[in-house]
Image (cartoon, rainbow, N blue to C red):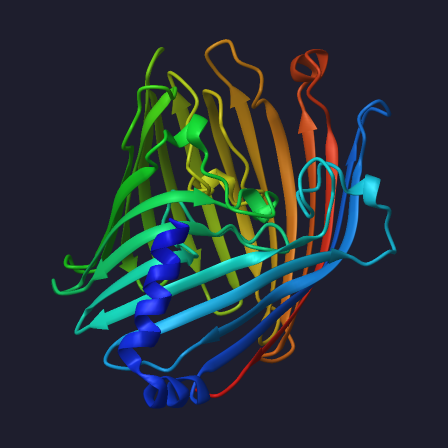
Amino acid sequence: MKKIIVSTLLMSVIVCGYDTLEESVKESHITLDSTLFYFDRDFDKPSTPNAKALTLGGIAKIVTAPWHGLQVGVAPYGNFLTGFTKRDEATGSSMLEQKENKNLTFLGEAYAHYALDKSSLYIGRQRLSTPLANDHDLRALPSTYSGIIFKTREIEKTLIEAGWIESYTGFGSKYNSFSTENTKWGERGLGYIYIENTTLANTQIHAQYIKAIDNQVIFLSDYRYADIKYNFMPNISLETQYGGNDYKSGDNSQMLGVRTQFNTTYIDTALLYNQIMDNKFQALEAGPMYSDWQQGYGNYEPSQAIGGYIKLKPFTNATIKLGSVKVTAKEKSLKDDFTESNLDCNYALNTQHKLRVRYSIKDETDEANALGYEDRTDFRVIYYYSFATKK
């Protein structure tokens, strides 16, 4: 994949020519997204290490101006311990490099983008935004992927996205590099197709299928997902979802979900239900389940989840989300047997400055506690600063 990226970037330079390339660079769009992130997780038992980290990092990105539909994007990523917390305290936080807790410094994005009419081709390191594979917003840095992605909107009210991904940077980019994931994805990576459609009135449909190209040595061969959202009125909606996985040995998994939402000017409410059956439900790197808004974790054992939330909008650019979900383990598994309550506050001072505060309490059942699963609290304060040159 590295050879593909380098060859593509060199070809872009050669095709553009010096004068055109110079003009394209002069008109480049530059963005800086920085994050000051405080993470503090405390477990109930003294024998389990807590996790704490205060980091400063972000993404500096430059995208050249288009020339005959061709653009090049490059973005170094970084996240650094500030010194106000100890490096060994960061273990388990997924804020720094896994195992050794080194600062994160790597080239997170490096791609060539070619657009023609309503279609686009991306080659190289890039962020994804699909139900089963996306960049997440749960840590200081997003997850990014290396591959080839094609997108088209040639069909009216429809997005079709097809891709091949070879490697990625892990949850929160904790790998500090790109890993090929041979033991999970197979030696030839994953292929996928993703579709969005709004042809039916008041209806949104999303569907994704991911398949391991070489599944001879891995235990999980594919990932499936689909959802439908119907708006009865502008402020009332009903959603359903389905997901599943095919396992090489053992039963295949299934996931079902339903959510209803009622939104007003100053308050949004939702009730939700999820059920996982037969085996673990897994996404590639995402939290697609309706009951998964609180933290975004997986894999998930067979279980049933019932919950809801209230989102208050007290004034412009401010939200306060209060929610809880009760997860009951099923089919002789007690891994997911808890109640989790969550507070999520967001305030945008302006387009450049944003503040987010999150707090959650996870209360395991007595049966789960007896097997070693622990109660815990999770507290995060995140300050975002964004800068962008005019396009």
Indicate whether 375 appears above or below 231: above
Query: Quick check: can you spot residue 389?
Result: yes
Q: How many marks?
A: 0
Q: Position of residue 233 (x, y in %)?
A: 29, 61
Residue at figure coordinates x 66%, y 50% from the top left: 343
In the foreground, 351 or 16 = 16
In the foreground, 274 or 261 = 274
Query: Quick check: can you spot residue 208?
Result: no
Q: Position of residue 46 (x, y in %)?
A: 86, 25
Q: Which residue reaches farthest left?
A: 155
Residue at figure coordinates x 46%, y 34% from the top left: 181
Which quadrant holds residue 364? top right
In the foreground, 253 or 228 = 253
Which quadrant holds residue 182? top left
With 21 as the anchor, is 304 left or right in this view? right
Which quadrant holds residue 227? top left
Indicate whether 43 appears above or below 164: above
With 44 as the anchor, is 367 left or right in this view? left
Q: Position of residue 307 (x, y in %)?
A: 52, 38
Residue at figure coordinates x 35%, y 75% from the top left: 13
- The quarter of the picture where the C terminus appears is bottom left
Q: Position of residue 346 (x, y in %)?
A: 63, 64
With 132 as the anchor, is 269 left or right in this view? right
